[in-house]
Amino acid sequence: MNDRKLLEVVGLNIGFGAARVVKDLSFELRSGEILGLVGASGSGKSMTALGIMRLLPQSAVSSGVVRVNGETLSGMPETQLHSIRGRDVGMVFQEPMSALNPLMRIDDQVAETVRLHRQVPLAEARRAAAEALVDLGLEQNALERLPYELSGGQRQRVAIAMAVVMSPRLLIADEPTTALDVITQAQILLLLQRLVRTRNMGLILVTHDLAVVARLADRVAVMRRGEIVEHATAGEILRQPRHPYTAALLKAARLQPKRTVPPAMSMAASTPAVLEAQGIVREYPRKRTSLWHPAPPLRALDGVSLAVHAGETVGLVGESGSGKSSLLKVILALETSQAGEVSLFGESLSSAKGATLSRLRRGIQAVFQDPYGSFDPQWRVERLIGEPFFLLASPPPAAERRRKVAAVLEQVGLSASDAQRLPREFSGGERQRIAIARALITEPKVIAFDEAVSALDVLIREQVLSLLAELAQRLKLSYLFVSHDLQVMRAVADRIYVMQRGRIVEEGPTETLFESPRHAYTQALIAATPKLPVS
Amino acid sequence: MSGSSRNPSLILGAAITAVFIGMAALAQFWTPFDPRALSIVDKLQPPGAYHWFGTDQLGRDVMSMIMLGAQTSVGVALLSVVIGVFVGVPLGLIAAARRGAADELLMRGNDLIFAFPALLLAILITAVFGPGAVNAIIAIGIFNIPVFARVTRAGALQQWTRDYTLAARVAGKDWLRISFEHILPNLAALLVVQGTIQFSLGVIAEAGLSYVGLSAQPPTASWGRMLNEAQTLTALAPYLALFPGLAVLLFVLGLNLLGEGLRRRTGRGA
């Protein structure tokens, strides 16, 4: 590692109107070094990354000095900045699809970057592009494809190829793996690490995920409300955080595995299943590609069976596209399956209609992933939470409704006065509490959670998870918890089902599954999950 | 954020629209002169202090006729928007909620109507039922149906992808109820913007139809027919064409500004 400063940021300020999102930020980076810029959403970490590149939105006002390789970027005219971006500094964003031109072959896109900075014939630029893409792990025969023909991980490789094809000294990656599943995430992180080591680049890794930083970064800067609250080597931050905020973040990120009392296990097995799915097959029609033969349907669920016993939290893990969400929709009777049956308290939910269906539905409610999309933006909280009253044969009178809504609001840690507010007035964590309140209002026995904490920051996630644990105990609830996040699973579930390509490949008590996974896919998932060192 | 201070098109558009609608309402009770009173003595008076906009070849007061013409214009355009909304919006909601065959059937039916020029449709209706304001309303209204159906379907499809529709289904609500309780209220802003735009197109269409004699018949005043009648007298009395022409132009401009202003204010719309 040489001692030349690759990047120097001195007194960087960024503001929008009166709001200051980045306050007097200073740090530096040397060649061959990886700096993790960590913080919750809204901490100003992404704005800092954009500020370095002078790519801020027009409404932003910034001041301070940014020097790359001794050249001062602040105050540099836009035309000169163009030649710096891409040549000296590369950038990778969270969503690779939006960074790529959907109508252009990927090798041409990378070649275009080459030709922007170097006067070379197209053939030579293409050769350089192909070399870069193959070096980043794309197959030779994939080079002529269009972005939509690639997987998320492959697209991110293309985006990285575009960023590094000119061999920049500095790479800025803003949440580069957040949109990817764990196994692909592990591969991309490894790739970034290799690039930094072999090319002696500097890397700024912007992320909300401390475990990602722990895996990769040499130094870590923790941001909160536009300021760096702690800046030290990764080892120091992770083992002996000095600032209380860092300590709180770490504690929340290091989810404690659920302590399952052995008797509870045996009890769960002996009690009858409250929710049972047997041999579920769900097929989706595919677009016809031939005039003569209908396309074979896409089998999203291929004979899936699972059971949830009274008082048990069951986890369902798998990556995106494994069929988790389809299964949940069948279980909630939102979609019909081609074969198999779902039963609730021993009664068939799949074939229920009318009043019976309403009665059964009262017993199973759901919380969805997106805390912003799961509420009608025009309804007030009281009406939103009261929506499942529709399932009752005779809806309670207004006063009774109001009392019940107030009661559930208090149960989830909000106040009764929140009932008259609109969903947009709440933060992401509070909205998820409202969603839980809505699920509780009909006093169900089972609640299904679809990635219910995936969109939350670690501190909020910890609070929501402990609320769920408390509610489960107090109200004797059973949970079906769907997630791609193994860490979360380990913290909430008593028993886990692992799903891959529409089938359950492994099932078992949480700790057994984590300690001795049998199926190769489970092993790969567990190995790929980024872990924080134990303090 | 009120936004109206930085949204001049909203203020200007609303003001112009209000003036014309106010004028149409006022004409119901009062006009400067009786627009139907013929007075050959006063014929072809140029605009002046007594007759502000002058008089036509039969001595009728042009300003009074413009005011009454605004009634026809607003009435026809408004009712045709109402037809478009009441038929098109439910069709769009059904297409978005049911997808599949229902969607195909409804939307291809819409394409069929859309492919038919509005004027041709008006001539067809007139040929069958005879000319008149009511038939103009029907012709323009039919033309509005696919417009509203498409806008509604596009907006509703987007709403259906959001998790709150799943939550409503878990609460046992069927697609019809969700469409009316959740989807439609969230499309209101979009539809108001589209309604304003269709209103302005309706004003132009009404003027065009009455110009060729397919809309309101005499003695009902109408801007399009005033233009038609002024045509032969352009050399003698150009103001006869100027005022109804300006009325159409200003009203349409005002409505378009209003639509644009509303679109910018709600941040959505066509």
Image: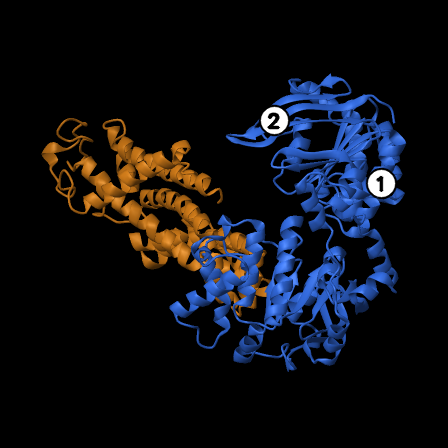
Task: Please check whether the numbered discs 1 and 2 fall on a single chain.
Answer: yes
Q: Is residue A175 left or right of residue B234?
A: right
Q: Is residue A414 left or right of residue B11?
A: right
Q: Quadrant of residue A334?
A: bottom right
Instruction: Give the chain letter at badge 2.
Output: A
Q: Residue flagged by tag 2: what amino acid is it?
A: Asn
Instruction: Give the chain letter at badge 1.
Output: A
**Pointer 1 with pointer 2, Cβ within 8 A:** no
Residue, disc 2: A13
Q: Quadrant of the N terminus of chain B?
A: top left
Q: Which callout, 1 or 2, points to the residue nearer the camera? A: 2
Indicate the secondary structure of the residue bearing disc 1: helix
Q: Residues within 10 Å of mark 2 (few under 14, many from 20)?
A: many
Question: What coloring was used for the rendering?
Answer: by chain
Above or below, A118 relative to A41? above
Q: Residues within 10 Å of mark 1 (few under 14, many from 20)?
A: some
Above or below, B46 relative to A423? above
Could you tell me residue A97's position as x and y percent?
A: 71, 43
Q: Residue flagged by tag 1: what amino acid is it?
A: Leu
Q: CA distance from mark 1 to mark 2?
A: 32 Å
Q: Which chain is blue?
A: A
Could you tell me residue A193's position as x and y percent?
A: 84, 38
Q: What residue appears at the point 55 percent right and 53 percent down from the top-left corner?
A: A430
Q: Would residue A534 be visible to someone looking at this image?
A: yes
Q: What residue appears at the point 67 percent right and 42 percent down from the top-left corner?
A: A244
Q: Which mark is residue A191?
A: 1
Indicate the secondary structure of the residue bearing disc 2: strand
Nearest the viewer among A450 and A124 is A450
Nearest the viewer among A28 and A506 is A28
Report which colour depicts chain B: orange
Nearest the viewer among A92 and A49 is A49
